[in-house]
Image (cartoon, rainbow, N blue to C red):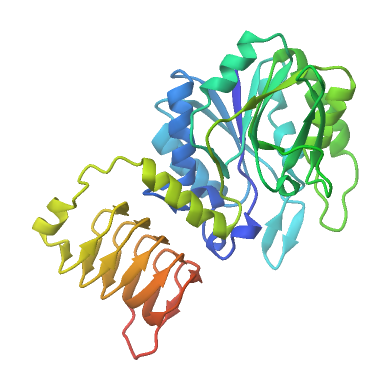
């Protein structure tokens, strides 16, 4: 089996955070998003499983990090999706369908597990594998019932529980089964999958259009291939938008086992002074907190400094320096400097500088 992860896009909806890093490198609950995903894959798939990342935007950053941290477990291959062009020096790509097509030389005659880098299931992927091997079908699609399916790919089932239709972001959804970032397609279907992806890639694109995966899956269904669903019982975290980062951080923190839940060692070492920590809170390495009230549901990166702050339900990046900040539901980018601010829902990208005084640069 080949695992395939398209990770080439720039994450436009997550700007300004993705100006300096790929969206899968956003740190939530103490880990990068891609780390959360790959740890779940490690708990599902055996050592030496083949995995292919289709990279593009920030490709060097991605390849170096993944090679350093995961090549001891996975057999990793990288393929590069070339941009269609550039807008104000920012690349844009031809879509998910074309990204997956690049993996044809590896996965055309094998089982293929496609997962997206901005969707994180709270449970691991073992159930989708079990459903695939227990049933006679050509593939299984991960789904979750949601309240507003029009923002997702939506699946409609026939009376036998087989996928009847799959539609990308329909204006009038026929069900509330939302595709949840993972597809397991058997070798009986992958050859035809890549043929259809190649046919689609030859269709000219204009006005921001992309070649999607969803219409190709629908054509496979119409040709008689049998696809079933694996309904996830727990949350699927969608990190495609800034507001979803806050909710995802909150849910992940509730499940994170903190080695020092009372933060006693940090108090004793002087890392935290004259402050109150209200769990759950993740505090990164070499971060210092003084005269502050932090929590609940706050994730703080490495090498940050917080002085005289009151923060809750927020994500603070590596190297951030916050002084006299009172806020909740905020996302502060890496190496940002903020001073003297009382505001809810602050969204600040990496290396930003906001101060009302003549504070020296850190």
**Residue found at x 67% / y 62%:** 90
Residue lying at the far left in this picture: please name it.
Answer: 268
Measured as percent of width and height from the top left, residue 239 is found at 56, 50
Which quarter of the figure has residue 270? Answer: bottom left
| Spot occupied by residue 112 in the image (x, y as percentages of width and height) | 65, 22
Name the residue rendered at 56%, 62% in the picture.
19
Q: Classify the position of the N terminus by image quarter.
A: top right
Q: Is residue 267 left or right of residue 280?
A: left
Q: Nearer the viewer, residue 160 or 309?
A: 160
Residue at x-position 78% and y-position 36%: 214
* Residue 197 shows in this picture: no
Tell me, yes or no, if residue 315 can be seen here: yes
In the rendered image of this protein, does residue 70 appear above or below residue 112? below
| Front residue of 244 and 206 | 244
User: Is 47 on the left or on the right of 264, as rendered?
Assistant: right
Foreground residue among 282 and 98: 282
Above-or-below relation of 117 to 27: above
- Quarter of the view holding residue 276: bottom left
Q: Quadrant of the C terminus?
A: bottom left
Residue 160 rendering spot, x and y as whole percentages? 79, 16
Q: In this view, does 239 lie above or below 362?
A: above
- Residue 99 position within the rendered picture, expressed as x and y whole percent measured from the top left: 71, 38
């Amino acid at each position: 089996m080949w695992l395939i992860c398209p990770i080439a896009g720039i994450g436009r909806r997550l700007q300004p955070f993705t100006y300096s890093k790929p969206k899968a490198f956003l740190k939530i609950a103490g880990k990068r998003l891609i780390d959360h995903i790959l740890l779940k894959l490690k708990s599902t798939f055996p050592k030496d499983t083949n995995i292919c990342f289709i990279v593009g935007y920030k490709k060097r950053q991605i390849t170096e990090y993944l090679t350093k941290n995961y090549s001891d477990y996975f057999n990793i291959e990288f393929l590069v999706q070339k941009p269609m062009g550039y807008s104000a020096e920012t690349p844009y790509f031809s879509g998910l369908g074309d990204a997956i097509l690049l993996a044809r030389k590896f996965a055309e005659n094998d089982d293929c597990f496609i997962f997206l880098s901005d969707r994180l299931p709270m449970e691991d992927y073992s159930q989708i594998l079990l459903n695939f091997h227990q049933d006679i079908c050509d593939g299984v699609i991960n789904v979750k019932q949601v309240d507003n399916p029009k923002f997702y790919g939506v699946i409609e089932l026939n009376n036998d529980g087989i996928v009847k239709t799959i539609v990308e972001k329909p204006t009038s959804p026929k069900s509330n089964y939302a595709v949840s970032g993972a597809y397991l397609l058997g070798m009986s279907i992958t050859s035809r999958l890549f043929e259809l992806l190649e046919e689609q890639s030859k269709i000219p694109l204009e006005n921001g259009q992309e070649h999607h995966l969803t219409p190709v899956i629908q054509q496979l269904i119409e040709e008689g291939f049998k696809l079933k669903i694996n309904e996830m019982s727990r949350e699927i975290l969608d990190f495609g938008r800034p507001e979803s980062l806050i909710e995802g951080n909150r849910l992940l923190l509730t499940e994170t086992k903190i080695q020092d839940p009372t933060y006693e060692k940090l108090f004793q070492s002087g890392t935290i002074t004259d402050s109150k920590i209200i769990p759950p809170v993740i505090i990164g390495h070499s971060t210092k907190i003084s005269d502050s009230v932090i929590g609940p549901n706050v994730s703080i990166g490495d090498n940050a400094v917080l002085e005289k702050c009151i923060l809750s339900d927020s994500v603070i990046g590596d190297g951030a320096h916050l002084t006299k900040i009172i806020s909740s539901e905020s996302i502060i980018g890496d190496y940002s400097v903020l001073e003297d601010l009382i505001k809810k829902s602050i969204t600040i990208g990496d290396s930003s500088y906001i101060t009302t005084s003549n504070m020296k640069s850190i």
